[in-house]
Each structure stands twice: as C-alpha cells, then as structure tokens.
Amino acid sequence: MFKSLTSAALPSILVFLAFAVEHGQGEHAAAATFCDLQPGTACAWGSDGTGKLGNGADGNQNVPDQVDGLGNVVAVDAGDFHSLALLADGTLRAWGSDVFGQLGDGGTNTNQPTAVAVSGFALPADPDVVAIAAGNSHSLALLADGTLRAWGLDNFGQLGDGVGNSSTGTPVAVSGFALPADPDVVAIAAGNSHSLALLADG
C-alpha cells in the first residue's frame, strides 16, 4: 500500500513507523521499529482475525506487540489481512491470511499467525528484495536489479503477469519489468486491487 521505509530513518528511541490500513476490514498496522528497544524488530497492533499481527496469538492488540521470530527488519507493509517484512539480507517474510496466496509461501493457502519465508526470497543466495508493498490480497517485491515480482489475488489482473485472473501463492514476474534489460523500477505501491511502479526514467 505504502512505499517501504528503511531502518536508516529510525532514531534510537521508540518510534512507530506505522502503515495504517484503511481498506475494507483490514484494521491493523505494522511498524519497523525499535520494538521494546530492540533494533531491527517489528511491531504490529489492531485486529488479529487472521493472524496478521504475527504474534502467534488470536486476539486484538490495542498497543504495539512484537512480531514473533523476526530480526534485522528494515521495512514492513500491511495489507488488508496480511503483513510483509523485508530483512536486511534482502530476504522476505509474510504472515496473516493466505486465502489467495498473498503470503507467497508456495501456495499453501493456509493462514499463518507467525512469519513465514516468501518463496524465492528466503535465502541469502536468492535475488535481493529492496522494497515491498502489500495490497488488499496481493503482494509486490522490487528486486535489486530493478525487476518486479507479484503474488496473491489476481481477480483484476493486479499481478501484472499478462495472464489475468490467475491467483498464485508463488511470486511471478511482472510483465515488462521481468528482465534486467527492461526499464528499471525504483518504487512500488499496491492498492486495493491494482499495482503501481515508478520507473527510473520518471
């Protein structure tokens, strides 16, 4: 939904960089912050109906609570019923609803109350992710080489893979931004049912 922010922007005090969700019923927020004064952890709060707070519990939180099992977090984003976290090593984690494959964990379509690895971006040897965006029920990842991947709900073609209406739990290349020879993407955003990319040439 919103562009990612990195830990470089964080002061050495408890500050919440929240991405509040306002579509539909996705009433939660996530933050890359010094949660409990621990650098590189992530916090979430609000509604937890599908595990989107990532704390392993099933209950709403009216104060920020640490997301389980995450460290070296540099960016987060919150969709309607899922959340994403980008780690310092360029790998990616997701949690919450996976009914349309928006967690990208290989198509399990199983809700996850704690963070799981996103397929293709789980190991340091995989392509580095530099920015993330979470839509209503789809997700985007911008890679270091300027190419773009998408996964999750595709009922309106929001994955941009040229197929249309083909939801997937595995990241796919976005058409026109899939090869290093294609125009470089420098920023991304995900709306309710659409996606945006800013190119290097403006």
Image (cartoon, grey):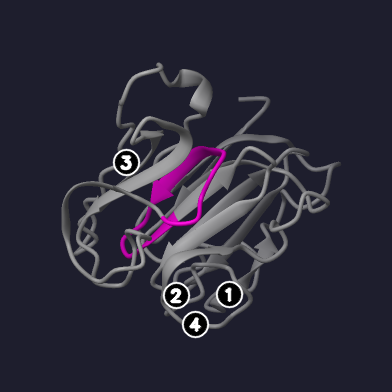
Secondary structure category for the residue under label 3: loop
Marks 2,1: beta carbons within 8 A? yes
Q: Amino acid at mark 2?
A: Asp
Residue at image coords 24%, 61%: 26
Which residue is tagged 2?
98
Which residue is tagged 3?
19
**Tally of numbered discs:** 4
Q: Report x, y in % for residue 76.
A: 45, 43
In this view of the protein, which residue sits in the foreground, 84 or 79? 84
Which is more N-terminal, label 4 or label 2? Answer: 2
Residue at image coords 39%, 72%: 97
Q: Identify the image quadrant of residue 57.
A: bottom left
Which residue is tagged 4?
109
Secondary structure category for the residue under label 1: strand
Q: Is residue 39 magenta?
A: no
Q: Report x, y in % for residue 191.
A: 38, 52
In this view of the protein, which residue sits in the foreground, 69 or 27? 69
Confirm whether residue 195 shows in the render: no
Q: Amino acid at mark 4?
A: Asn
Q: CA distance from mark 1 to mark 4?
A: 7 Å
Marks 1,4: beta carbons within 8 A? yes
